[in-house]
């Protein structure tokens, strides 16, 4: 079968290559890939800066943001042919550590976890893959191709899960949320915030383009850098840029019991002016929390796939239905045309053209149409373009 592969550590090695069919030991569910998202982590792997192949192999099949359809599933797996699914990225370490043993592999403490398409395991950018049902999540078929956004959505689902766990260390009634960065991760974070009923602000630098309108369509308020206004008093901040200075500017505001979650990754060597005394006073005297969040476990995939039903009952305020994103597909859910969505990106806010029909734009979903065109996975103009026909699946 064809797959998008790299030789880890070797820049320029990305190619569409023939690879063996997925082995039976990979799991009893066989899935045909429908779409792959490409994010900053993939870019690092393609540039030879990150990633590792399975032991004893030279090439790594990339792809950790995925959407597929079940081709065959053994009885008792809980899946049937035709199910629209997303594969989980990380696998527990073999020891396992206490976190992995509890299914919290996103919090692995010994670093011996593996990740499909990233670390010691082949990814999903192949025509087919096999998988154990423990690491597979069903997606509402009405989402169509938008289901490929599930993995990046799990990043912010986990962020929200941990924010709310921290918040409930005491009586807590947050009202406002500030998301820094209107890239794909920021928009998804804002979406989940609006779904929770919070007054939501999204901060970004641009004054033109689609971002301001997209934020508005989510039901949030767009804020330009340097003009925080009410957004500067937010009870919760979700940082999605990796731009440290922006965080410090916002963090200078005195807000009691503020919880700040960092999801963006900064480049090493960046410099910013910090007053450690002021930071200390803000943290201690306001009972504030700043914490980092990366990756996701199965619970977060389920949160992202079923946001209305998988929220903990103790969270507040009462969630409201999403204002602009809903499953608007055909009743049988077979359509996969999604004309206006944002291409996903995990941690670096890098926007890529995803497929011919999934591109940067607004996040609202239009009614879906029958679609029989081949799936195309674009890496970049200078990299590989793999095209394989998908028959009888859409
Ligand atoms: Zn572990």
Image (spheres, rainbow, N blue to C red):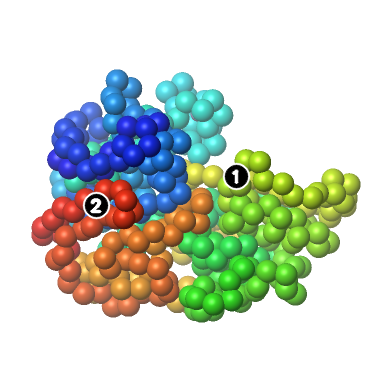
Left or right of 262? Residue 322 is left
Position of the N terminus by quadrant: top left
User: Where is residue 277 shown, x and y percent of the image?
Assistant: 89, 47
For the residue pair 347 and 145, the one nearer the viewer reads as 347
- Residue at horizontal 54%, vertical 62%? 186
Q: Secondary structure at mark 1?
A: loop
Q: Quadrant of residue 132?
A: top left
Q: Quadrant of residue 198?
A: bottom right
Position of the C terminus by quadrant: bottom left
Left or right of 308? Residue 169 is right
Above or below, 6 relative to 340: above
- Number of the label disc, if any, that sits on residue 267: 1
User: Where is residue 21 shown, x and y percent of the image?
Assistant: 16, 35
- Residue 38 visible in rendering: yes
The residue identified by callout 2 is 385
For marks 2 and 1, the one nearer the N-term is 1
Above or below, 160 relative to 59: below
User: Where is residue 330 shown, x and y percent of the image?
Assistant: 24, 74
- Number of the label disc, if any, that sits on residue 20: none
For the residue pair 260 and 126, the one nearer the viewer reads as 126
For the residue pair 79 and 212, the one nearer the viewer reads as 212
User: Where is residue 170 shown, x and y percent of the image?
Assistant: 75, 53
Instruction: List the single residue furthest toward the left.
Output: 392
Above or below, 137 relative to 269: below
- Residue at horizontal 16%, vertical 37%? 18
Left or right of 156? Residue 66 is left
Q: Residues within 10 Å of mark 1 (few under 14, many from 20)?
A: few
Q: Secondary structure at mark 2?
A: strand
């Amino acid at each position: 079968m064809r797959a998008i592969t790299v030789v880890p550590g070797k820049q320029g090695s990305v190619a569409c290559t023939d690879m063996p069919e997925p082995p039976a030991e990979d799991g009893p569910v066989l899935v045909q890939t429908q779409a792959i998202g490409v994010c900053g982590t993939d870019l690092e792997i393609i540039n030879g800066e990150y990633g590792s192949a399975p032991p004893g192999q030279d090439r790594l099949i990339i792809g950790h943001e995925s959407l597929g359809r079940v081709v065959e599933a053994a009885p008792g797996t809980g899946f049937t042919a035709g199910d629209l699914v997303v594969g989980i990225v990380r696998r527990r370490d073999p020891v396992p550590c206490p976190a992995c043993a509890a299914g919290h592999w996103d919090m692995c403490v010994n670093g011996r976890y593996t990740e499909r398409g990233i670390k010691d395991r082949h990814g999903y950018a192949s025509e087919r893959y096999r998988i154990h049902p423990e690491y597979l999540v069903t997606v509402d078929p009405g989402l169509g191709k938008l289901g490929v956004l599930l993995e990046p959505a799990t990043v912010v689902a986990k962020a929200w899960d941990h924010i709310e766990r921290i918040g409930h260390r005491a009586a807590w009634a947050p009202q406002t949320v500030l998301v820094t960065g209107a890239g794909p991760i920021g928009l998804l974070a804002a979406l989940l915030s609006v779904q929770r009923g919070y007054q939501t602000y999204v901060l970004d630098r641009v004054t033109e383009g689609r971002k301001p309108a997209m934020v508005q369509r989510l039901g949030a308020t767009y804020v330009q850098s340097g003009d925080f206004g009410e957004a500067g008093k937010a009870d919760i901040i979700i940082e999605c840029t990796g731009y440290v200075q922006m965080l410090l500017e916002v963090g200078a505001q005195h807000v009691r019991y503020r919880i700040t979650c960092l999801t963006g990754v900064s480049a090493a060597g960046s410099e910013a002016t910090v007053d450690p005394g002021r930071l200390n006073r803000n943290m201690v005297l306001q009972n504030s929390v700043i914490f980092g969040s990366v990756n996701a476990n199965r619970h977060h995939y389920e949160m992202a796939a079923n946001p209305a039903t998988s929220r903990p009952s103790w969270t507040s305020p009462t969630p409201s239905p999403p204002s602009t994103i809903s499953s608007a597909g055909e009743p049988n859910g077979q359509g996969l045309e999604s004309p206006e969505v944002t291409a996903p990106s995990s941690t670096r806010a890098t926007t890529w053209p995803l497929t011919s029909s999934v591109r940067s734009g607004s996040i609202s979903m239009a009614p879906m149409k029958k679609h029989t065109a081949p799936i195309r996975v674009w890496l970049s103009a200078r990299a590989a373009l793999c095209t394989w026909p998908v028959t009888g699946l859409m």
